[in-house]
Image (cartoon, rainbow, N blue to C red):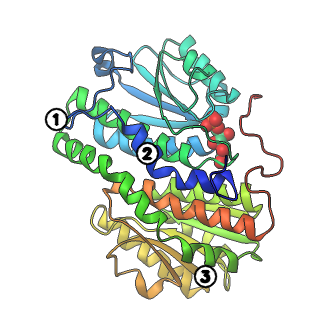
Amino acid sequence: EKGGYDYFMLKEIAEQPKAVADTLLGRIDEAGRLTLDEVRIPDHVLREVDKVVIVACGTAYHAGMIAKYAIEHWTRIPCETELASEFRYRDPILDQRTLVVAISQSGETMDTLMALRHAREQGAKVLAICNTNGSTIPRESDAVLYTHAGPEVAVASTKAFLTQLVACYLVALYLGQVRGTKWGDEIRSVIRELSQISTEVEKVLGTMEPVRELARNLADKNTVLFLGRHVGYPVALEGALKLKELAYMHAEGFAAGELKHGPIALIEEDLPVVVVVPSPRGRSVLHDKIVSNIQEIRARGARTIVIAEEGDEAVVPYADHLVRIPATPTLLQPLVATVPLQVFACELATARGNEVDQPRNLAKSVTVE
Ligand code: F6R
């Protein structure tokens, strides 16, 4: 049932192009507009929403962090993303005009369930983004957008994450479409790009051998750092989380702008640092800033592993290892940038002799708070 792969995780990583395409299936009409009738929250209610709050745990929380950038940019509705386990304990401000989005692969995560129950008690509308049909979280929500990734067996989440991202983009773009914003043209063009993204994910998967080889060479390291900015920051956090849970290594993700506020003190000779580089076309200021971060850490001895868009030549002189990803619209980059980090963690775990599908101390669904 592993379909010829050694681990479910490898199979699920390989299934991502199809999973992403399945999340989009039937949700974009011939005119290139989104049709999310299944989300039974009427358009007039969505037009009234004045705040979006996303709650989730772990990898799903990282998808939610990325969704915040997308929702605020395309809809201009203030959005916050919060760890489900923290949410209700701070007495959050919610009312009928708040849309709460609960993201969960399993649909059974107790922290997320308790957060959405709290939100509904306060009168907020809850939309679940979920992979498991008929699970508790969608049953207790006002509406659900299923990710259709297919069953995810490996404990470490991979294809569920990519499809959560796609579902988040759909929600953001749909809210933008329903409400009408100044980004109408951009929204239409991003929908077009999104419908092609599965091919780009496929391309990345075809170029992963050097990443595997690099992972094998780093198997005796103790620490790996991850840096990113904008939507690359949650990607860095996700890369670090995958490495902790699978390789049992110390791994940390930072917003690259925070380097000088502390983390740069960690840089020492031959420390592997993975850097997710924003597109030089989109937010070019951020691109240039991160290139100087790479320069700075390399001057202090870091071994730089740079994930950068095809054609980005500015990074070449400072990259000890260069991983190319296809050019995508800025906000969609996590769909291609995360894949090498999944492969990296999986291969490191294998090289260290760890049980890839069943990491120690972890369970696939966490049904206690
Ligand atoms: C990481 C991982 C966990 C889950 C988290 C939430 O690889 O699998 O961090 O993402 O426990 O689980 P769900 O999405 O089922 O609510």
- Closest to the camera, between mark 3 and mark 1, is 1
Disc 2 target residue? 20
Disc 3 target residue? 302
Disc 1 target residue? 31
Give me the C-alpha separation between circle 3 and circle 1: 49 Å
Q: Which label's residue is closer to the chain start, 3 or 1?
A: 1
Q: Residue 92 sits in which quadrant?
A: top right
Quadrant showing the C terminus = top right
Residue 233 seen from this side: yes
Quadrant holding ligand 1?
A: top right
Give me the C-alpha separation between circle 1 and circle 2: 20 Å
Q: Residue 250 sits in which quadrant?
A: bottom right
Give the secondary structure at mark 1.
Answer: loop
Q: Which label's residue is closer to the chain start, 2 or 3?
A: 2
Whether residue 281 sits left or right of residue 167 in the image: it is left
Q: Residue 217 sits in which quadrant?
A: bottom right
In the image, residue 142 lies at what x, y percent? Answer: 48, 15
Residue sitting farthest toward the right: 361
Out of 129 and 78, give the one closest to the viewer: 129
